Each structure stands twice: as structure tokens, then as C-alpha cells.
């Protein structure tokens, strides 16, 4: 009867096997931080997009209410943003504001008509706080800290929103160049492409103002080291009437 001889792994084979497994596991583990960072960036980008849409909507509503039913010629509307042909100081792109409201001392800026998520009237809990005419402190809340008897909501994301007039009128920079605008011609309203407009047709500053929203985050970091995202949009004077504008400027 033939005796069977068993074969066992020797030390070299064991070391080689462990090496292969270690290399494989290392390769897989390296992907985890990459995936976590990608997920974190995706969440941040989603937060930024949501906040940008929210702030732009509030700004447009605020301007529309301020300009309601009194500006068919666009003169008041233009003067909100421009001093002659130059943007007002508060709406210049180089006017940087780096402040954060001092809630610890009880000094909180005016709130932009936004109720606190908790239902409280305390402005400290507002989603949007107006720091000055063109700067806002925006926050997202993740719920209420149940360990806190005052039910204060906790902040999951915080950024500073700054708006300024986009005064780049170059052919490459002006994103309104392919749009059509209402003008008065022989007693009626027609639409002309931006590139076909002349100075006698319409003063676009009376009708539309191109703006840029800058979101810098996190809000508690110094301005120079914050990440920044930019969104271009326009504010339109819904009460503008080219015929009224033309008549007023002709007299």
C-alpha cells in the first residue's frame, strides 16, 4: 500500500501570499479616502447650488418689492445699482466684506425676512442674515440639538454670500450679448438683439442688471482661504416700459 505524503506551505510561500493580500488590501483601502472626499465634495456642491438658488430668489424678491409699481422709465431701478455709468460702491466687485455677525454679544444684523427654522423669532436662528446691502450670511440647519434644552438648531453648512454688478461689457465677457431686449420704435415695442442695440434704442441699465453671486465657505475661515463659487444672474425691472422711457428721455 502506497503511503500518501502531505504537502504543507513553506515559509516563503506564506510570506508571498501575505504580501499579495497586503498589496490588494492596501490598493482597496487607498480608495476609501478618495471616495469619502468625492462624496464630501458632492454634498458641498449640492449645498452651494441650493444656497445660491435660495439667495438669488430672495435678492430678486427684495429688489422687486423695493421697486414695485413706480419705475416704468427705469430711472429709479438704474440708480439702485449705478452711479452714472459706474456701479454703486456697495455693488463693486472689488468691495470685499469679510465680517461675520457677532452672535455671542447679542449683536445680530437685520434679517432678510426669513423665519427661523425652529419657528422661534430669535434672529440668531435665521437661514439668511443681512450683513450689509450686498452681503449675506447663509446657513443650513441639520435639526435641533436634543441635548440643548433651548432647542437651538445646529448648523451643518455656513457661507458668506456677496453680490456685485457684473460690469464686464466686453464681447467675450458679457453673457447678455445673445439676448433680445425691448425697445421703442415708432410708437411700438420691438425686440432687438444686444449686438444690434444703439445708444438711442435703450439704456439697458434701466431694464436689466447683470449680477454675480459669490459664495465663500466655510464662513468662519479667513476670506483669503475660503473656497469660492460664482453664479451669474440678472435682475430685471418688471415694470419697465420702453415707450415711457423713450418719452421721458426725449423731453
Image (cartoon, rainbow, N blue to C red):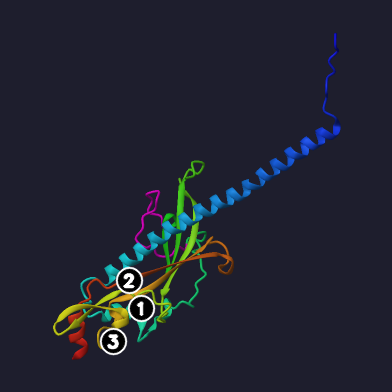
Q: Are marks 2 and 3 in contact (CB under 8 Å)?
A: no
Q: Is residue 102 above or below residue 70?
A: above
When asked about the image quadrant of residue 86, the answer is bottom left
Residue sitting at the far top: 1
Task: Please give left or right for residue 48 compared with residue 189 in the image.
Answer: right
Q: Earlier in the sequence, mark 3 or mark 1?
A: 1
What number is the disc on residue 235? 2
Q: Which residue is mark 1?
A: 81
Taking the view exactly as shown, the residue that stands out farthest to the left is 187
Q: How crowded is the residue under tag 1: few (<14 C-alpha within 10 Å), some, or many (20+)?
A: many
Q: Position of residue 75 (x, y in %)?
A: 26, 81
Mark closest to the chain's N terminus, 2 or 1:
1
Looking at this view, is 133 or 246 the one in front? 246
The residue labelled by disc 3 is 198
Q: Position of residue 63 (x, y in %)?
A: 31, 70
Residue bounds of the magenta highlight: 107-123
Secondary structure beneath disc 3?
Answer: loop
Quadrant of the frame with the N terminus: top right
Residue 69, image x, y percentages:
20, 72
Name the foreground residue: 9 vs 1.
1
Q: Tell me which corner region of the image, top left, top right, bottom left or bottom right, holds residue 74.
A: bottom left
Mark 2 residue element: strand
Where 159 falls versus 249 (above or below)? above
Q: Could you give the CA–CA distance between mark 2 and mark 3, rounded to whole angstroms?
A: 21 Å
Task: Based on the picture, tell me whether residue 114 belongs to the magenta stretch.
Answer: yes
Amino acid at each position: 500500500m502506497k503511503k500518501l505524503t502531505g504537502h504543507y506551505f513553506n515559509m516563503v510561500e506564506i510570506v508571498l501570499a501575505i504580501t499579495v493580500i497586503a498589496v490588494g488590501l492596501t490598493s482597496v483601502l487607498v480608495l476609501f479616502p478618495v471616495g469619502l472626499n468625492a462624496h464630501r465634495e458632492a454634498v458641498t456642491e449640492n449645498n452651494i447650488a441650493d444656497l445660491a438658488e435660495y439667495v438669488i430668489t430672495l435678492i430678486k424678491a427684495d429688489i422687486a418689492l423695493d421697486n414695485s409699481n413706480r419705475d416704468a422709465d427705469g430711472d429709479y431701478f438704474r440708480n439702485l445699482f449705478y452711479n452714472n455709468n459706474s456701479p454703486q460702491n456697495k455693488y463693486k466687485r472689488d468691495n470685499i466684506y469679510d465680517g461675520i455677525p457677532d452672535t455671542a454679544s447679542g449683536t445680530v444684523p437685520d434679517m432678510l425676512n426669513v423665519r427661523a427654522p425652529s419657528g422661534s423669532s430669535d434672529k440668531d436662528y435665521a437661514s439668511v442674515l443681512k450683513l450689509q446691502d450686498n452681503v449675506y450670511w447663509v446657513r443650513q440647519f441639520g435639526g435641533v440639538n436634543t441635548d440643548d434644552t433651548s432647542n437651538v438648531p445646529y448648523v451643518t453648512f455656513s457661507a458668506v454670500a456677496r453680490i456685485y454688478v457684473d460690469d464686464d461689457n466686453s464681447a467675450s465677457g458679457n453673457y447678455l450679448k445673445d439676448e433680445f431686449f425691448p425697445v421703442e420704435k415708432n410708437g411700438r415695442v420691438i425686440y432687438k438683439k444686444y449686438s444690434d442695440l444703439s445708444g438711442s434704442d435703450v439704456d439697458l441699465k434701466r431694464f436689466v442688471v447683470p449680477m454675480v453671486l459669490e459664495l465663500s465657505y466655510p464662513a468662519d475661515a479667513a476670506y483669503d482661504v475660503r473656497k469660492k463659487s460664482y453664479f451669474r444672474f440678472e435682475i430685471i425691472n418688471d415694470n419697465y416700459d420702453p415707450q415711457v422711457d423713450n418719452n421721458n428721455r426725449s423731453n
